[in-house]
Image (spheres, grey):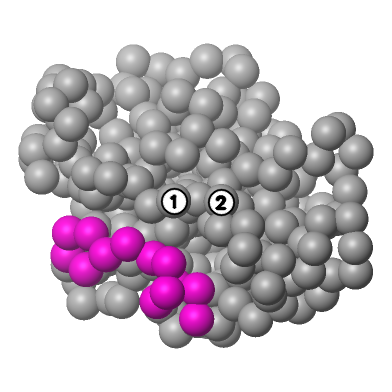
Amino acid sequence: MVKIAVTGKGGVGKTTLSGTIARMLAKDGFDVVAIDADADMNLASAVGIKKSPKPLTDYKDLIEERAGEEGGMFKFNPKVDDIVDKLGVVGPDNVKMLVMGTIDTGGSGCMCPASAFLKAFLRHVVLKDKSAVILDMEAGIEHLGRGTTKGIDLMIVVVEPGKRSLETAERIKQLSEDIGIKHLAAVINKGKSVNLKPQLEAMGIPVLGEIPYDEDLVRADLEGVAPIDMGGKWVDAVAQIKENMLQMIRSFH
C-alpha cells in the first residue's frame, strides 16, 4: 500500500500536488484517503471537493468522549479506527478526505486530549489503514512523530527556484532523519529556467521530476476547478511523477 507525506515551503504547490496525486491514485484503482495536515487547510479545492470537511479538532464532544477532557485525565490511545468512515468526505473518484485542524497550545506545546486524538488518528491511518494515504503536511512536519513515520513509504518535498525553498528542503531532510523517515524525494515546481536537480541530489534528495509553469493551473485556481479536471502540461507532468513515485516505492519493498 502507498503512504506518502508531501511537504515544502508555503506557496510552492505542495497542496496542488497532493490533491492531484490523490485523484490519480484513485483513478488507478487505489482506495485513497487524503488528509489535510496543513494549517492553511486548502486540500479540498485541490482534490475537487467544493465544501471542505470540518476539521477533526472541531469535533470537541467526540474528542472528549474518546480521549478525555481538557485539563483532566486523557487517553493516549483513543478509539480512532472508525474516523475515516464516520467523518471523511467523499470527493471525485471516491477520494476520501479529512482535515486535521490546528490545536491552540498557547505556546506551551503541551499534550492534550485533542493532540492525543490527532496523533492516534495519524498512527492508525499510516500504520493500520489499508488505504493509500496522502498527507498534505506543513513544512515543519510537526504532526509526524516517531511512531507514525514507520509507516510512511516516502516523504516528498516540493521545491521551486529560490534559496529559501532549498533551505526548507535541507531542513526537512534533517527533520525527517531525526524522526526516522528513511526515504525522501523532491519534486521541482516551475524550475525549468534554473536547474535545481544537482543541488538537491548533492543534499542526498533524489528528484522524482519537474513540473513546468502552466497557465491552465492558474486558470483552474481562478475558476475553482481541481487542476486534474482542467488538464494541461502540469497534469501530464504530475502523472509521470506519480509513476516515478510508485516505481521508487516498489523498489523499497
What residue occupies the far front of the structure in this picture?
A: 61
Element at badge 2? Answer: helix
Measured along the vertical axis of the image, is residue 235 above or below residue 159? Answer: below
* Place of residue 22 in the rendered image (x, y in percent of width and height, measured from the top left): 31, 58
Measured along the vertical axis of the image, is residue 173 above or below residue 78? Answer: above
* Place of residue 1 in the rendered image (x, y in percent of width and height, measured from the top left): 43, 80
Could you tell me which residue is drawn at 52 percent across and 26 percent down?
10
* Place of residue 184 in the rendered image (x, y in percent of width and height, measured from the top left): 59, 53
* Place of residue 5 in the rendered image (x, y in percent of width and height, measured from the top left): 53, 55
Q: CA distance from mark 1 to mark 2?
A: 7 Å
Instruction: Give the quarter of the image for residue 62.
Output: bottom right
Amino acid type of the residue that numbered disc 2 sits on in the rendered structure = Asp
Label number found at residue 81: none
Element at badge 1? Answer: loop
Label number found at residue 58: 2
Q: Which residues are magenta?
A: 82-94
Between 49 and 186, the one nearer to me in the picture: 49
- Look at the numbered discs 1 and 2 and tell me whether their residues touch, using CB distance below 8 Å: yes
Whether 157 is among the magenta residues is: no
Could you tell me which residue is drawn at 31 percent across and 76 percent down?
31
Amino acid type of the residue that numbered disc 1 sits on in the rendered structure = Lys
Measured along the vertical axis of the image, is residue 47 above or below residue 79? Answer: above
Q: In this figure, which residue is indicated by the disc labeled 1?
A: 54
Mark 2, residues whose alpha carbon is within 10 Å: few (<14), some, or many (≥20)? some
Between 64 and 13, the one nearer to me in the picture: 64
Mark 1, residues whose alpha carbon is within 10 Å: few (<14), some, or many (≥20)? some
Could you tell me which residue is drawn at 31 percent across and 54 percent down?
21
Relative horizontal placement of residue 253, taking residue 173 as reference (left or right)? left
Is there any visible trace of residue 214 in the rendered image?
no
Relative horizontal placement of residue 166, taking residue 135 as reference (left or right)? right
Is there any visible trace of residue 176 in the rendered image?
yes
- Magenta stretch, main secondary structure class: helix
